[in-house]
Image (tube, rainbow, N blue to C red):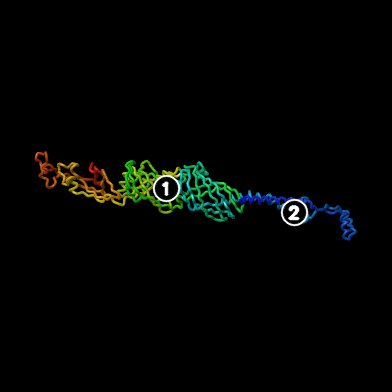
Amino acid sequence: PPPKGAKALLASATAALLLLISSLTALVAAMSERTSIPDAKTLQRLRSDYGQAQSREAPVSVAMAQQEPHKEPGCVKKTHRYFCGSVKATSYTMLAMISFAALFWVPIIWYVIVPAILNMLAGATSVNIKSATMADPTATNMKVSAVVEINNAGPFGCDIDAFNATIHSPPEDSAPNGRPIGWMVVPPFTLKGNGPGIINPTTMVHVTDAAAFNKMAKGMLNGDDVPWRMTSEITVWSMGIPFSISIDKQTVFPPIELTNYATSNLEMSHGNTTTNQLVIDADVSFYSSSPMRLEGFGTIKAELYYSVAGNDPDLSPEARLRQGGPPIRDDHVKIGECHMYDYRVEQGMNTIQTKIFLDANYATGQSLGRWASEFDQTIVSVGPTNISPFIDGIWEGANDMPGSSITLYTATFVTADTLVKGYNPKTGEPCKVWDGGIDSCDRGSTVMGMNPFKREWFIKDIVYDTYFEEEYEYDGTFMAKPVPGQEDVEVPFAGGTTVGNLFNIPAVDFTCSASKVLGRTFSKPGMWAGY
């Protein structure tokens, strides 16, 4: 069977032919029905037929008067005689005029005026995207499904055929009307008249300008309302008749503002000696208030950058975010990358399992040390780096990394035995005065701590500074005297000199100005050999 469009056109053609035939017939009949005024003889004969044989003589004044030419009542010109004749002639004339009007005006109304009105109503129609899902991106395209509210400004419902739409970027100085960045096929849908309607299209967006799309996507991730402009030629079916109209509509996709990024549950996994990286398992969480969803992105990779100066422990959180957060500056150093598995974004709180690959460099060491010391830090993540040209690099944001919840160094203390006397690490005996080298005598503080990771690990070649909580100014006296019980011990190779005689040194007073610094502690070289 022929389509409904062909049926409508065939019916219109048949009606037009019948109207043309009827109008020509009426015109011929009207022209044959001309009406004439009878002369005197004819009038006399008509009177005799009706019993009036004698004609009435008109008064002399009347008879001698010049007769006025006869005028048909209601007729002004000869061309109007078709309206002044019989009822039949007038009816044919009116029918002819109606047929002519139908033949002339109906096509104009349906194919000129009605499309113009539809274009005007299409311009007044608003399009609002209630929610959307972007999924399965490739190098050149991405699947998009949405819940769209279309407010039909027209009084009639309509069916819209599938159409190919061009997507334009937001206006800019070099392109006031935006620039084409891609295209998509919009599936067919139906709208009710004079009111809003909801459609659920799913289509594939094909990106033709990756750089322009990337710029637009960055604005969306920053929480900006980014307008999308769509142009196309579409076919609208109304009352069974197709109309071709042009559309140029602008709508706004919901922004995807991801906030409250945080890294937690850090757990050391292993070290990779081939890449010289430390691998840490962690959870990355963030919040999305947007109805825009992302899914099917697989594993997303992002680069991590760290500013040593911007994460100084003495900075306030606001200053740390300002100096250590985005944008990337010269003092930011790449410390590794983060792999986020099964990446998806839904409205609300999101948590994603990740692996962090940390490079072995100075900035990484500073970051790990501050984390173990329970200092909060700000790390900048940039990504993704592995999805597609029109998506890669659209995110550059601050990632807050709270300090460890487990105190690495729980206590440090010094005594006379450990700091002054010292002990032999092999025998445990007190150090000899004449044999106090680093190989046979250890002096220093006693440090106790806890492992913030579940996995065993070693800390080698330690150097750390010790500070007071507040500044102190203090005085002291330096005294050198033998260890009690060793005063009479003879010093080898000293010719019988005793320890008491050798170290009979007068006391020395000293003063330390106000400072928070207590001292620096470092591990003895070689003490971690074998680990």
Q: Which residue is mark 1?
A: 298
Query: What is the count of numbered marks?
Result: 2
Residue 323 rendering spot, x and y as whole percentages: 36, 45
Q: Residue furthest left?
A: 496
- Image quarter in which the C terminus is found: top left
Closer to the eye: label 2 or 1: 1
Is residue 111 found left or right of 322 in the rendered image? right
Residue 468 rendering spot, x and y as whole percentages: 26, 49
Is residue 344 found left or right of 117 in the rendered image? left
Is residue 364 found left or right of 105 in the rendered image? left
Name the kind of residue labelled 1 in the image. Answer: Gly
- Spatial CA distance of label 2 from label 1 is 78 Å
Residue 254 rendering spot, x and y as whole percentages: 47, 51
Quarter of the image for residue 92 reads bottom right
Of mark 2 and mark 1, the one earlier in the sequence is 2
Q: Which residue is mark 2?
A: 92
Is residue 238 found left or right of 73 in the rendered image? left
Q: Secondary structure at mark 2?
A: helix
**Looking at the image, residue 270 lies above or below residue 57:** above
**335 vs 485, nearest the viewer:** 335
Name the kind of residue labelled 2 in the image. Answer: Tyr
Mark 2 closeness class: few <14, some 14–19, many ≥20 residues within 10 Å: many
Quarter of the image for residue 55 reads bottom right
Q: Residue at 88% of width from left, 59% of height from top?
A: 49
Residue 361 can be seen in this image: no
Q: Residue at 10% of width from left, 42% of height from top?
A: 490
Residue 201 rendering spot, x and y as whole percentages: 51, 51
**331 vs 271, nearest the viewer:** 271
Q: Residue furthest bottom?
A: 51
